[in-house]
Amino acid sequence: MKRIPGIFLLIFSLVNLVSAQTNNSPYSVLGIGDIEDSYFNRTNGMASTGIAYRSNRNLIDNNPASFSALDNQWFIGELGIRGKYINYSGKPVDPSNNRSFDITFRRFAVGTRIGKHWGSSVGLAPFSSENYEFNALQPIQGTVGETANAYYQGYGGVNRVYWTNAYDFFHHVSIGVNASYLFGSITQKTILQNPQIANAYVSTNKNLFLSNLYFNYGIQFYGKIGSHWNVVVGGTFANRSDLSAQANTTVLGLDSSVLKSQSVDGIYFTLPNMYGAGISITKDNKYTFLADYKFQEWSPLNYTGYNYALTNSNRVSLGFEISHKQNVYNNQVETNFFHAGVYYGDSYLNVFGQKIQDMGASLGVGLNTKRSPFAYTLTFQYGVKGTTNSQLIKENYFSISFLLSYRDFWFTRGKRFN
């Protein structure tokens, strides 16, 4: 365990190195931005299908109940980063500026089994992100058909730091709880310019500071069928939660003079009830087939605006894994694995009567080295989000994700859990 402080230093250096973000996401202008639906763990290559997935040496946060599967006496640390390329199409898109690329930190987590039936993990990951910049015409209130030139910009997002605990009963049932603290800031800027008067504009700057506790729960039932099959059935639930906010708004004139300034505290956004169910079937401890379904209950929150509304969302995904293992000192040790997955989802956005859909496929490969405590996972994903109908924007995206895992014996003071 003496190597761990040096590992932490390397990880935090990498996090600082890849924290920049340049991807524009047009649909993140609504709500709290794009809510992340990928987990950036071992299941990423299976389209993040893993509500019913259990692993003894990987941190699977798709379902908090999975952590009771961790091996005893092992410390595990994981770092995930992603590079993403997006090509935009649609009538509002400038052909000379229709693509973007970024590399961002997506997840850092550590975990271990700390009791005979008890697994635990702590981590940090983005929850949602807002990043947009565009020009448009803004109707002028009190007039008929008159508009002003408008420039809109927004960036920031919500992060979550979390602590997950899972406990198994009778070696067939596991329950888990993920307790998160959501926090972050979003900056939104609007500049309105009078087209009749040169250099006449008003700038509005809004800074939002968001925070609150957030809980989600999980359960897994697992067991063997015959001598060749392992089956896991899982479920997840997150209850409705409010995000508290402090909003500071400043309105500036042409000479940067302050025309108005105010600070307001209150509830800015509400996260809905969220449900998930999944199943995994494994043959001969080598081939695994997985399926997930997720539902988010946005409609009862009654969020509406100019030509948009938040509506119930669904996501379906399928995954497949081939795991290659070798017998080492009478134990099976995984050497490498291959993943594939597909997904389809309706997001929580309905814009100009169009449901914003997201679909795609992923492939992943992993390598567990025998002579070092490191393991590596590389995932490729391609997807399509949105549509060009109703003057909307379609995003064709391609991403490469990298997961670095560190595993070593935990200092147990002579204790051993079976």
Image (spheres, helix red, strand yellow):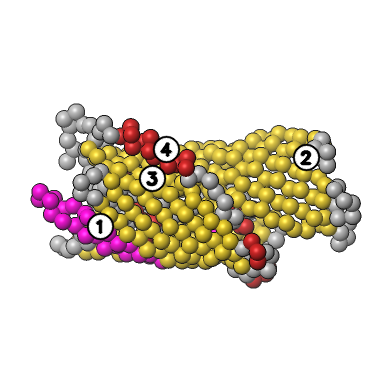
Mark with earlier residue (2, 4)? 4
Q: Amino acid at mark 2?
A: Val
Q: Quadrant of residue 248?
A: top right
Q: Which residue is mark 3?
A: 79
Q: Nearer the viewer, mark 2 or mark 3?
A: 3
Mark 4: amino acid = Phe
Q: Secondary structure under badge 3?
A: strand
Asked if 408 appears above or below 104 in the picture, the reply is above
In the picture of the structure, the residue carrying the numbered disc 4 is 12
Give the left or right position of residue 88, taking residue 332 as reference.
right
Q: Is the Cβ of the residue at disc 3 closer than 8 Å to that at disc 4?
A: no
Q: Which mark is residue 251?
A: 2
| Residue where numbered disc 1 is placed | 336
What is the C-alpha distance between the residues marked 2 and 3? 41 Å
Q: Which residue is drawn at the image coordinates 73% and 56% (left, top)?
A: 135
Q: Residue 344: within the magenta?
A: yes
Q: CA distance from mark 3 to mark 4?
A: 9 Å
Q: Quadrant of the N terminus?
A: top left
